[in-house]
Image: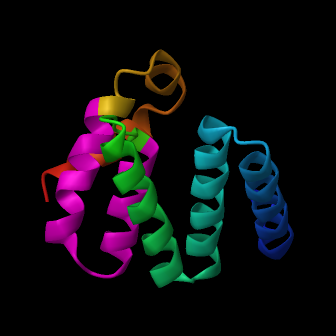
Amino acid sequence: HDLGQLDKALDLFERAQTHFAERAIPDRLRIARWCVARCLRSIGRLDEALAGQRALEAEYAALDEGDGYVYEELGELLLLQGDTQAAAPYFGRAHAILSQDPWLQAQEPERLARLHTLAQS
């Protein structure tokens, strides 16, 4: 994905999704599903990406959990669709969770600052 080979990345992420689904490994399956949806955003298939991230949001909610990366993606997708008002709370939730990660604090402070700024929009 990061190399720009989006079709190849999507194929690999979809195969990972199948692999983890067949083996009933829910945590890894959720990560693979997130990767598929993230790749769909990069390809420009925003509606499919949004549906995938919303499904993950619902699944995490059913587990009484939240995932900062899912919230970040939901914010990004809504922002791309021009809905800054709907995006802002997702960026806020993403920031609240992801800003607690020491690795992100050290390695991606600009990303965290952007999340904070977009949450205020």
Which residues fall within the magenta stretch? 69-96
Q: Residue at x 37, y 53 (%)?
A: 57
Instruction: Answer with left or right where residue 10 lies relative to residue 62.
Output: right
In depth, the one of 1 and 59 nearer the eye is: 59
Residue under the image location 77 percent in, 71 percent down? 6
The quarter in which the C terminus is drawn is bottom left
Hey, which quadrant is residue 65 in on the image?
A: top left
Asked if residue 72 lies in the magenta stretch, the reply is yes
Residue 59, can we see it? yes
44 up-or-down from 53: above or below: below
Task: Check if residue 47 falls in the magenta segment.
Answer: no
Q: Provide residue 39's location: percent of width, then percent of height.
A: 65, 66
111 on left or right of 31:
left
Place of residue 111 in the rendered image (x, y in percent of width and height, measured from the top left): 42, 42
Q: Provide the major secondary structure of the magenta segment.
A: helix
Residue farthest toward the top in the current orientation of the protein: 102
Residue 21 at x, y percent in the picture: 72, 51
Q: Quadrant of residue 24?
A: top right
What count of labels does the image hold?
0
In depth, the one of 109 and 55 nearer the eye is 55
Q: Is residue 118 visible?
A: no
Q: As drawn, is 76 to the left or to the right of 11?
A: left
Quarter containing the N terminus: bottom right
Q: Residue at x 52, y 79 (%)?
A: 48
- Relative vertical location of residue 72 with respect to residue 40 in this rendering, above or below: above
Query: x%, y% of residue 117?
Result: 22, 48
